[in-house]
């Protein structure tokens, strides 16, 4: 019986051998936590605008993308194989984003494109975090937040100019 318990214990230990060192565990936790944090920031912005894909969705997308990359790295795969992993993440998240796009009754009324693009960008940020490109992930998040915050302001500014009454000067008669 002692032999069986020892074998079970050895099997369990072997199952958790993907964390070869404390450094590996720290790296994985840091990358997943950063992906979740950055995805959460983007999700807060979307949620503040009343969009369905909010904090949890963006956190899960970023962490999921990071996890695919991290798990692949643990197999010590070559760059060509990592390229296929990234292609799968990009395509898969594209389908997820497509689910957020709604076409209205009017011919030109399409909603959800920004949310879909945000989910796609969130996955890209998660991939960067998973690959250990933390600075790139942070900069991309800041730029994305800047775009989401500032461009609507510019759009409103141009809408006001377009809505302003146009004064035409008629030449005097005579």
Image (tube, rainbow, N blue to C red):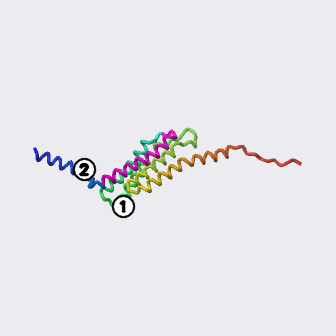
| On screen, residue 98 above or below 127 | above
> In the current view of this chain or complex, which residue is farthest to the right?
174
Lateral position of residue 45 relative to residue 128, left or right? right
Q: Earlier in the sequence, mark 1 or mark 2?
A: 2
Numbered disc 1: secondary structure: helix
Of marks 1 and 2, the one in the foreground: 2
Q: Which residues are magenta?
A: 24-51
Based on the picture, tell me whether residue 109 belongs to the magenta stretch: no
Dominant secondary structure, magenta: helix
Q: Tell whether position 30 is magenta.
A: yes
Residue 19, image x, y percentages: 27, 53
Residue 67, horizontal then vertical, whole percent = 35, 50
Q: Is residue 143 above or below residue 164?
A: below
Label for residue 44? none
Q: Nearer the viewer, residue 141 or 79?
A: 141
Q: Nearer the viewer, residue 174 or 134?
A: 134
- In contact (CB < 8 Å): disc 1 and disc 2: no
Helix or strand or loop: what does disc 2 sit on?
loop
The residue identified by callout 1 is 80
- Residue 74's quadrant in the figure? bottom left
Q: Which residue bears the numbered disc 2?
A: 16
* Disc 2 crowd, CA 10 A, few/some/many (<14, 14-19, 20+): few
């Amino acid at each position: 019986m002692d032999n069986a318990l020892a074998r079970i214990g050895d099997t369990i230990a072997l199952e958790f051998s993907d964390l070869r060192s404390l450094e590996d565990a720290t790296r994985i936790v840091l990358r997943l936590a950063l992906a979740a944090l950055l995805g959460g920031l983007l999700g807060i912005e979307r949620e503040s605008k009343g969009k369905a894909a909010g904090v949890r969705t963006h956190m899960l997308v970023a962490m999921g993308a990071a996890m695919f990359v991290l798990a692949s790295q643990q197999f010590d795969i070559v760059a060509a194989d990592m390229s296929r992993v990234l292609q799968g993440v990009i395509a898969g998240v594209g389908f997820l984003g497509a689910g957020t796009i709604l076409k209205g009754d009017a011919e030109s009324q399409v909603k959800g494109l920004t949310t879909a693009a945000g989910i796609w960008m969130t996955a890209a940020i998660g991939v960067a975090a998973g690959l250990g490109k933390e600075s790139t992930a942070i900069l991309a998040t800041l730029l994305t937040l800047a775009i989401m915050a500032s461009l609507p302001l510019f759009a409103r500014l141009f809408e006001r100019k377009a809505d302003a009454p146009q004064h035409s000067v008629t030449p005097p008669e005579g």
